[in-house]
Image (spheres, helix red, strand yellow):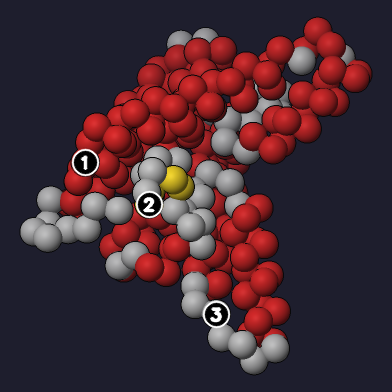
Amino acid sequence: MLGAMHRYDRSRQLLALGIAGLAGFVDATGYLAADQYFVSFMSGNSTRLGVDIATSPARAFIPALLIGGFVAGVTLGALVAGAAGARRKTLVVGLSAALLALAAIARMAGLPAAFMGCAVLAMGVLNNAFLRNGEVAVGLTYMTGALVRFGQGLAAAISGKARDGWLANFGLWCSLAAGAMAGAGASVMGGPLATVLAAGLALALFASAFAIERRPGAQSS
């Protein structure tokens, strides 16, 4: 299911690319603001957890809490998505935007723990924007699987065996990487104001999701 990007229409593909870019942007701002921990990339936090347990046990609670917060966000987003029906993307992205707005307020107020908590919840929630049969159809805040599918598709193309959608996976990675570069640049130049920009980007994606799902006959997946 995680390779289903190409099955969506153009507007939903663009929304997915935008969300991936937002995830990269937010992750970069969190990484630079919180001693190189992540709010989106839980594989990285899992590695940090193992390293911290071995080298600095007193700090191991940080990645552990971030991983727990991400899971809580995914759970919250799944509950919202399950209750939202045909307006799933609108409500999921809207909830994430609200959490990112709270994260921006916390960052501006000098509350780094609250900033990271709200940001990691927001990233967990976002993973429920594209679901099929209650499971993630398009991974939006993590790209290892997308790169694996791109590599497999590249191998198939070299072998002369056509495979649909493999370039779409590369596009998702490019969006996340571009978002991370933009987030890092915004953080270097604007400091805490970068989080306000992230909330603004999330609000724009919320408006896009609302416009997509209010169209007559819009698909709900």
Residue at x 48%, y 57% (from the top left corner): 1
Residue at x 46%, y 54% (from the top left corner): 138
Q: CA distance from mark 2 to mark 3?
A: 21 Å
Q: Is residue 151 left or right of residue 108?
A: right
Q: CA distance from mark 2 to mark 1?
A: 12 Å
Callout 3 amino acid: Arg
In the image, 12 versus 174, the foreground residue is 12
Report x, y in % for residue 200. 34, 37
Query: Dot 1: what SS?
Result: helix
- Contact (CB < 8 A) between labels 3 and 1? no
Callout 1 amino acid: Gly
Q: CA distance from mark 3 to mark 1?
A: 31 Å
Q: Is residue 50 left or right of residue 121?
A: right
Q: Is residue 91 left or right of residue 161?
A: left
Residue position for label 1: 85
Residue position for label 2: 132
User: Which one is closest to the eye, mark 2 or mark 3?
Assistant: 2
Q: Tell me which label, 2 or 3, sits earlier in the chain.
A: 2
